[in-house]
Image (tube, rainbow, N blue to C red):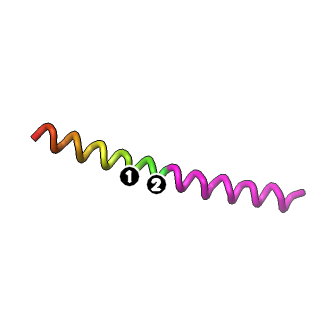
Amino acid sequence: MKQKVDNFEVLQSSILKKVVEYARQEYNLIMGCTLVEMS
């Protein structure tokens, strides 16, 4: 049972990392477009 919990935590953290990376890319894209429009 403990093993299952560990695997779930690892899975959760890897999903979280992907979400954070994706969000950062989206944010950079939006900020880049905003800066271009402002200038």
Count of labels shown?
Answer: 2
Magenta segment includes 26:
no
Do labels 2 and 1 touch, CB within 8 Å? yes
Q: In the rendered view, does 28 fall on the left or right side of 10?
A: left
Is 37 placed above or below 9 here? above
Residue that protrudes farthest toward the left in the picture: 39
Q: Callout 2: helix, strand or loop?
A: helix
Figure quadrant of residue 35:
top left
Q: Which mark is residue 15?
A: none
Residue drawn at the location 23% of the way across and 44% of the way down: 33
Q: In the rendered view, does 21 fall on the left or right side of 28?
A: right
Q: Main secondary structure of the magenta part?
A: helix
Figure quadrant of residue 5:
bottom right
Identity of the amino acid at label 2? Glu
Disc 2: which residue: 21
Identity of the amino acid at label 1? Gln
Q: In the rendered view, does 26 fall on the left or right side of 10?
A: left
Residue drawn at the location 15% of the way across and 39% of the way down: 37
Mark 1 packing: few (<14 Cα in 10 Å), some, or many (20+)?
Answer: few
Residue drawn at the location 35% of the way across and 45% of the way down: 27
Magenta segment includes 4:
yes
Residue drawn at the location 83% of the way across and 58% of the way down: 4
Mark 2 packing: few (<14 Cα in 10 Å), some, or many (20+)?
Answer: few
Q: Callout 1: helix, strand or loop?
A: helix
Q: Position of residue 28 (x, y in %)?
A: 32, 49
Q: Position of residue 32 (x, y in %)?
A: 24, 47
Magenta span of residues: 1-19
Q: Which mark is residue 25?
A: 1
Q: Measure how far apart labels 2 and 1 are at the Cα level.
A: 6 Å
